[in-house]
């Protein structure tokens, strides 16, 4: 199966550990033999299935060896094997309709479904940079639908899946270093979205993991991860990061502002106006102890205006979640808010992982579209 495959979601009853299930998958392919990675939610396990595809729109029956607990589970096939990029086709339900959006979430909250779908797609690649066994279940049909829209818009711009894979892996490695090697024991994921680092990676004993996000999103996540066990001392904090009082909520959940922390602002800053970005960074700095760290991703200003970005930007605008800010000098931006940081672009040393397809345009070249991975430390008071 190649990138021409479509996504199909099937509600599947799981019938007990080791049982076999037949799932009807309406698939479209090119008549080749393909491997389909099926991340199974609930239990977070995966099965690779070989299935012969013999033409567009044909129906196939697949035997799935499943291990479950006899409950209803969702099977989300992501057909991205053989290292190819995602199809831009809109995912369809088993009935051939466009998939519904997740109705309980706002547009901004739904962007977390997109990110989860990207992680599910990455997980199904043979050359994956990480494995997130929970991502497919968290993304659901709505996540695949959002991803298909982004993939369709992003054909001519550096690949969103590659960027996202590198970002996830970059931050995985960075957080492991800060906790395992540098002794930080408070991680604040702000916003957490449907990130699953607290579940899928191992953390030193005593690591407190704070997930800040909006209440509905955290609810959705709690329900979907009900069976999974976090590998850190997880604290969820339902709060608005632009609101007046997230500090109190964070404190009430066990955050200690006198101990070092690392804050991860992943997939957030471009949705906030520049003033709100500065206010947030300044508030985080004021609520962090000496020795604290920060990591974030952001785009530059050209990424908000260049013609080849229009289709992608238009998708986010249509969703009601436009990208509204970027910085050409992220080091300076963070410096004015209390941090000394380094900014890397995907493809730079330490932020490539053999995945970034394009040459990195040097910083002194104006007008190029960029994304930055920023990381650094709280500055000592001057
Ligand atoms: C694109 S997702 C990224 C989340 C996560 N870091 C990840 O990688 O999956 C954006 C998330 O930001 C959250 N968010 C956006 N604005 C927020 C705000 N003002 N306060 C709290 N959460 C916010 C949304 O609910 C959503 O979960």
Image (spheres, rainbow, N blue to C red):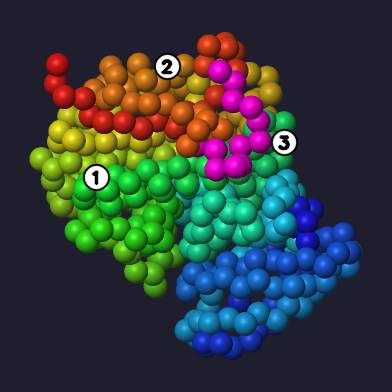
Residue under label 3: 155
The nearer-to-camera label among 2 and 3 is 2
Residue name at image x 55 percent, y 24 percent: 370
Q: Quadrant of the C terminus?
A: top left
Residue under label 2: 329
Residue name at image x 50 percent, y 64 percent: 133
Residue extent of the magenta highlight: 351-362
Q: Is residue 276 left or right of residue 39?
A: left
- Asked whether 382 or 77 is in front, the reply is 382
Q: Is residue 374 left or right of residue 248?
A: right
Q: CA distance from mark 2 to mark 3?
A: 27 Å
Q: Secondary structure at mark 1?
A: loop
The nearer-to-camera label among 1 and 3 is 1
Closer to the chain start, of discs 2 and 3, is 3
- Residue 358 rendering spot, x and y as whole percentages: 65, 30
Asked if the magenta segment contains residue 356, the reply would be: yes
Asked if the magenta segment contains residue 132, the reply would be: no
């Amino acid at each position: 199966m190649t990138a021409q495959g479509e996504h199909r979601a099937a509600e599947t009853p799981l019938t007990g550990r080791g049982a076999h299930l037949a799932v009807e998958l309406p698939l479209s392919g090119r008549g080749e033999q393909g491997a389909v990675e099926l991340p199974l939610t609930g239990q977070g396990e995966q099965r690779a299935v070989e299935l012969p595809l013999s033409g567009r729109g044909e129906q196939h029956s697949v035997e799935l060896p499943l291990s479950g607990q006899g409950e209803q589970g969702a099977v989300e096939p992501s057909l991205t094997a053989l290292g190819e990029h995602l199809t831009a086709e809109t995912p369809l339900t088993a009935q051939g309709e466009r998939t519904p959006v997740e109705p309980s979430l706002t547009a901004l909250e739904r962007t977390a479904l997109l990110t989860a779908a990207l992680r599910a797609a990455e997980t199904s690649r043979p050359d994956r940079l990480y494995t997130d066994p929970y991502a497919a279940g968290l993304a659901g049909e709505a996540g695949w639908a959002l991803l298909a829209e982004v993939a369709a818009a992003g054909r001519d711009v550096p690949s969103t899946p590659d960027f996202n894979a590198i970002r996830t892996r970059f931050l995985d490695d960075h957080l492991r270093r800060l906790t395992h090697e540098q002794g930080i024991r408070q991680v604040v994921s702000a916003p957490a979205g449907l990130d699953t680092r607290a579940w899928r990676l191992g953390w030193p004993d005593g690591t407190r993991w704070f997930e800040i996000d909006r209440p509905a999103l955290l609810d959705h996540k709690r329900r979907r991860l009900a069976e999974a066990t976090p590998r850190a001392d997880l604290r969820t904090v339902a709060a608005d990061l632009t609101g007046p009082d997230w500090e109190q909520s964070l404190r009430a959940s066990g955050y200690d502002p006198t101990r070092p922390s690392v804050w991860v602002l992943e997939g957030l800053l471009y949705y906030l106006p520049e003033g709100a970005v500065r206010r947030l960074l300044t508030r985080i700095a004021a609520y962090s102890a000496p020795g604290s760290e920060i990591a974030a991703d952001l785009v530059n200003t050209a990424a908000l205006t260049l013609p080849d970005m229009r289709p992608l930007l238009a998708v986010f605008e249509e969703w009601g979640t436009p990208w509204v800010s970027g910085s050409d000098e992220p080091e300076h931006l963070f410096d004015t808010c209390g941090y000394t940081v380094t900014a890397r672009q995907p493809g730079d040393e330490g932020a490539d992982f053999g995945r970034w397809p394009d040459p990195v345009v040097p910083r002194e070249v104006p007008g190029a579209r960029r994304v930055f991975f920023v990381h650094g430390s709280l500055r000592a008071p001057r």
